[in-house]
Image: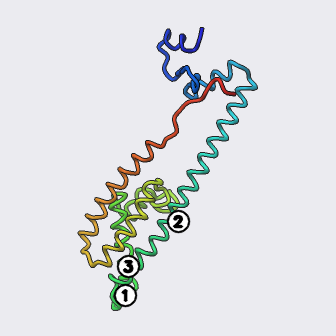
Amino acid sequence: MSPKKWIEATDAIGIVSKAGRYGGTYAHSDIAMSFAAWISPEFQLYIMKDSRRLKTDENSRLSLNWNLNREISKLNYRIHTGAIKGNLIPPELTSAQIAYTYANEADILNVVLFGKTARQWKDENSTVKGNMWDGATLNRLLALANLESYNAILINQGRKQKERMELPRQLAVWQLQALETVSLNNLPKLGVDLHKG
């Protein structure tokens, strides 16, 4: 019985057979693993090792992307704090007032992007090392980097705090929606060609 006939006879899901030059039999990775075991233990071991290698490579790439976005957001944080220093901190402020101003401005972006201040996040995650930015997704880190630059522009333009909450919030929503769409469209398709070894 051919794979195509078997698929049709059993209404199989998770497995597809295509004819033609670029055809083949493709299956969900879990089905392919079972098929590999049926062929031979050596082939199953080969498939399992290769699958782990691919997963390790994927995690390594994600880690590099995350680290890159984290570094970009750190650099943009300097742009942001430079705008704060140049526009929102008069010389007569005390050290405590200056620190409060920086924290308050950072919390504007925290609330816009994460829905909470740094203190609220820390209170909710007291056992977690680092801050909310350390646990952020790639998309949120990219949006954060963009928001820091955008808020620095708004500060330099002399915009009031209310506007600096509303405008970045609109930008964050739009960017996150756009980034999610891009991410979903670029996900690799599940499937393994069972005829290739």
Look at 34% across and 74% down and name the residue there: 153
Q: How many marks?
A: 3
Mark on residue 71?
Answer: 2
Q: Amino acid at mark 2?
A: Glu
Assess whether mark 3 and mark 2 are in contact (beta carbons under 8 angstroms).
Answer: no
Element type at marker 2?
A: helix
Mark on residue 83?
Answer: 3
Element type at marker 1?
A: loop
Mark closer to the observer (2, 1): 2
Which one is earlier in the sequence, the residue at label 2 or at label 1?
Answer: 2
Residue at mark 2 to residue at mark 3: CA–CA distance: 19 Å
Vertical position of residue 30 compared to residue 61: above or below: above
Which one is earlier in the sequence, the residue at label 3 or at label 1?
Answer: 3
Q: Amino acid at mark 1?
A: Thr
- Badge 1: few (under 14), some or many (20 or more) residues near its Cα, within 10 Å? few
In the image, residue 26 lies at what x, y percent?
Answer: 56, 25
Look at 44% across and 71% down and name the residue there: 77
Res 193 quadrant in image: top right
In the image, residue 147 lies at what x, y percent?
Answer: 37, 65
- Colouring mode (rainbow / by chain / secondary structure / one colour): rainbow
Vertical position of residue 53 compared to residue 89: above or below: above
Q: Amino acid at mark 3?
A: Ala
Q: Quadrant of the C terminus?
A: top right
Q: Nearer the viewer, residue 137 or 181?
A: 181
Mark on residue 94?
Answer: 1
- Badge 2: few (under 14), some or many (20 or more) residues near its Cα, within 10 Å? some
